[in-house]
């Protein structure tokens, strides 16, 4: 295809139906074959006149065919965007309850969030198809995130467990001690004279940190719920951590006993309810037995439907007792979220960081929390803004 023909082809795909009848501009009839099918798929979703006419309509078979077309002609990232737009623009949420639809979609984290919001409405015949979609996404997320999370958290636990005053020879980490004292090497004696020892803290083989994830399952937090469920399952696999997962709206449910299977965890959530952060924090207080060794991650946009002042007092009491409280306004790839700035500012004033975090930054966040160092590398949204 020549340069001029390629230019016309691209303009025709960009303009869509607006190019029809533009014979003088040379755009009419320039698309055929695969290009024509791509144009038809885009028109069905994005052309307002087409949507008011035939469009995709509310026919599950027609939408399923359209989903198959876009998977054939567009890369996976574009397919996920188009699916998300179709669900929002054409109100296809109810059609996702049809097994035929679920088998046609490209699984992604946004689709999982939508399916979880429909969990209570889902007929039994669609449930297994929905589980297959969720299982595929969870498997992909675990492959992407597990290794980095385990490495970052394990390294932080090792560093936090070191001491420069080991009491017994068995507690000395000789490898790190030698490396730390290479400047004291005596060539004539072929030995290192250590000026300081690096050792393991006592009890390092036991549980060293308690981690409580309290996750807001209101509708706006759908993607965060998915990522939090996967991360909770990864952290629960580490013996050095005691991990609890609490999901809440106006009620609170403890999902800790399901952490062996993140798919079960996600289907144990009930997306779309109201929000009572105070009630969730009150329940989390009952889980804290070692305040100085506890990290509480509150994943919420902070739009409180319960008693605000009581919620702030509870969080203040936890921090005063030694609990590290971190508020994640979102745990997603989406960037800066919508959140209650007044509550975020109130928490920041009492020393509780509140910021959004991407899934890729979460391992470093956990490492920083364990070592009690800055979270600056993990932030998307500065506290209180």
Image (cartoon, rainbow, N blue to C red):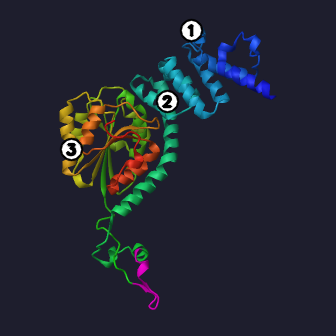
Q: Quadrant of the C terminus?
A: top left
Q: Position of residue 229 (x, y in %)?
A: 40, 40
**For the point 56% across and 23% down, which residue is it?**
100
Is residue 310 visible to the viewer in this orientation of the structure? yes
Residue 52, labelled with which disc? 1
Tags 3 and 2 touching, CB below 8 Å? no
Residue 126 part of the magenta segment: no
Q: Which residues are magenta?
A: 180-192
Q: Which element is circle 3 on?
A: helix
Check disc 3: other Cα within 10 Å, few if <14, some if 14-19, many if 20+. Answer: few
Q: Is residue 205 left or right of residue 311?
A: right
State which tag comes first along the sequence, 3 or 1: 1
Q: Is residue 116 left or right of residue 195?
A: right
Q: CA distance from mark 2 to mark 1?
A: 25 Å
Q: Position of residue 298 (x, y in %)?
A: 31, 40
Q: CA distance from mark 3 to mark 2?
A: 34 Å
Residue 286, labelled with which disc? 3
Residue 111, labelled with which disc? 2
């Amino acid at each position: 295809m020549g340069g001029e023909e390629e230019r016309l082809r691209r303009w025709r795909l960009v303009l869509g139906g607006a190019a029809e009848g533009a014979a003088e501009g040379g755009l009419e009839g320039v698309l055929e074959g695969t290009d024509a099918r791509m144009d038809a798929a885009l028109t069905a979703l994005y052309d307002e006149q087409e949507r008011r006419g035939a469009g995709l309509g509310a026919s599950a078979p027609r939408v399923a065919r359209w989903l198959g077309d876009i998977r054939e002609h567009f890369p996976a990232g574009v397919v996920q965007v188009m699916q998300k737009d179709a669900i929002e623009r054409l109100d296809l949420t109810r059609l996702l309850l049809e097994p035929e639809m679920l088998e046609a979609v490209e699984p992604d984290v946004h689709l999982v969030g939508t399916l979880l919001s429909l969990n209570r409405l889902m007929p039994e015949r669609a449930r297994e198809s929905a589980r297959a979609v969720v299982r595929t996404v969870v498997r992909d997320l675990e492959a992407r995130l597990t290794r980095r999370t385990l490495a970052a958290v394990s390294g932080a636990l090792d560093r936090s467990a070191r001491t420069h005053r080991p009491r017994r020879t068995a507690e000395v980490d000789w490898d790190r001690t030698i490396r730390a004292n290479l400047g004291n090497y005596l060539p004539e004696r072929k030995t290192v004279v250590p000026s300081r020892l690096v050792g393991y803290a006592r009890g390092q083989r036991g549980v060293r940190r308690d981690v409580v994830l309290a996750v807001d399952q209101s509708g706006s937090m759908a993607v965060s719920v998915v990522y939090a469920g996967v991360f909770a399952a990864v952290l629960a696999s580490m013996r050095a951590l005691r991990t609890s997962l609490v999901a809440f709206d106006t009620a609170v449910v403890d999902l800790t006993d399901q952490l062996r299977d993140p798919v079960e965890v996600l289907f144990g959530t009930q997306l779309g309810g109201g929000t009572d952060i105070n009630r969730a924090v009150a329940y989390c207080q009952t889980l804290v037995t070692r305040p100085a060794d506890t990290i509480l991650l509150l994943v919420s946009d902070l739009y409180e439907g319960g008693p605000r002042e009581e919620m702030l007092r509870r969080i203040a009491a936890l921090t005063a007792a030694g609990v590290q409280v971190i508020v994640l306004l979102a745990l997603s790839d989406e960037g800066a979220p919508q959140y209650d700035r007044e509550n975020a500012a109130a928490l920041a004033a009492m020393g509780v960081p509140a910021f959004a975090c991407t899934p890729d930054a979460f391992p470093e966040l956990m490492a920083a929390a364990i070592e009690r160092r800055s979270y600056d590398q993990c932030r998307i949204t500065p506290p209180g803004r």
